[in-house]
Amino acid sequence: MQVDHSSAGGEEPPSRHQVSALKSFRSAGRGFWHDVAEADWQDWRWQLKHRITSVGQLEKLMPSLTPEELAGARLANHKLALGITPYFFNLIDPADEACPVRRQVIPRIEETTTASWEMSDPCGEDSHSPVPGLVHRYPDRVLFLVTDRCASYCRYCTRSRLVSNASGYDFHPEYDKQIAYVAAHPEIRDVLLSGGDPLLLSDEKLENLLSRLRAIPHVEFLRIGTRIPVFLPQRITSELCAMLKQFHPLFISIHANHPRELTTEVRDALARLADAGIPLGNQSVLLKQVNDDPAVMKALLQKLLMCRVKPYYIYQCDLIAGSAHLRASVAKGLEIMEHLRGHTTGYAVPTFVIDAPGGGGKVPINPEYVLCRNAGRVLIRNFEGKIFEYPEAADGRPCGQPPKTIPEPELV
Ligand SMILES: *Cc1c(COP(=O)(O)O)cnc(C)c1O
């Protein structure tokens, strides 16, 4: 097997300067909102109230919208709502049509094109839903949908059929029924709150929900999937952190795709969560012209470690309707993984997964490191392409060694 160590497509590897620019922490700044009072800017409810939700606002703030974006924004509210917090909007480079932040939140007309293999429920969640708002696919854990709203809307959202309610799905979680199901199923030891974004709930509502779940004796492990630390770091108040830390073990998975999303504001919000003893993970989606580049992905993952976040998953982009313009290939994902393992800190290396279309769950995808296996050996290659042999007999014992009886150690 030939292993290509050069960077993607024979391009020049990024210079040290480019990589350190990707990894430096900067504030998102105030931009258009420079004269807003600091107390308002830092208030998460102010940020939500002032979200960009209409094409008119967007055009005013960003005269450089392309025709594709303008047409996309006009149609967005029929499919997946347009929504961007002022804080996050300031990360967009209006002069760069290919800005990796821009591509994630500004609608494009391509969203209205659906390829024949794309779906409205690509992971088959509705067919694994015993009660509304609960997905029970794996034996010991459930996905518990808390709300259909988010602070901002990712254009490639896998749950866009229900999130933001733009397409009339009319999602209404029924906490009583969801909790009753968990309570009635002793095999459920892990409850993952998601949505929509659970951290959009008030502290009181979230505390109530977490308390009710914690009161179920067989629920060992709680976790929250949220993009709020990235879209709305102002929401991560010390009061929220103090409330959350009552429910340990509680893990949080965040969602960052590009190093530029890790601003000083996000870094500080993540520090507050980590200081509350909450182990942090990150889930990225592999996206074309956002992070489908080994140098960009590596910078993101290393920068996450600097924020005490363990990169958990990289997702192959689900086959959600209207996402073809954002989908990178599985081959690109494998190439990125090849550039990570061995080349950087093992803690920075997430698992690359495909959430199997139709509802098979997450399947890990790895570059092949086992070259061949037969009765006597496993032939492996390392990250540098060097080949090694691990001798092993068919029954798992080291090759060539007859089974030995090991004397019992003497008891002292
Ligand atoms: C992703 C997911 C989970 C959690 O999976 P882990 O691999 O344990 O993080 C649980 N339920 C559903 C339906 C999911 O999609």
Image (cartoon, grey):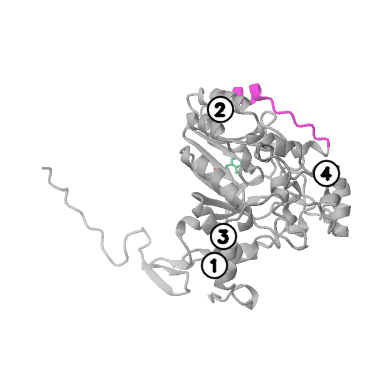
Q: Are marks 1 and 2 in contact (CB under 8 Å)?
A: no
Mark 4 Cα within 10 Å, few/some/many (few <14, many 20+)?
A: some
- The answer to whether residue 177 is seen in the rendering is yes
Which residue matches tag 1? Answer: 339
Distance in Å between CA atoms under marks 4 and 3:
36 Å
Outermost residue toward the left in this view: 412
Name which of mark 1 and mark 3 comes first in the sequence.
Answer: 3
Under circle 3, the secondary element is loop
Distance in Å between CA atoms under marks 1 and 3:
21 Å
Query: Which region of the structure is painted magenta?
Result: 168-183
Which residue matches tag 2? Answer: 210
Q: Are marks 1 and 3 in contact (CB under 8 Å)?
A: no
Which residue matches tag 3? Answer: 24
Is residue 45 placed above or below 4 in the rendered structure?
above
Relative to 293, is 35 on the left or the right?
right
Distance in Å between CA atoms under marks 4 and 2:
31 Å
Q: Position of residue 207 (x, y in %)?
A: 57, 26
Name which of mark 3 and mark 2 comes first in the sequence.
Answer: 3
Q: Quadrant of the C terminus?
A: top left
Under circle 4, the secondary element is loop
* Residue 109 forms part of the magenta stretch: no
Distance in Å between CA atoms under marks 3 and 2:
36 Å
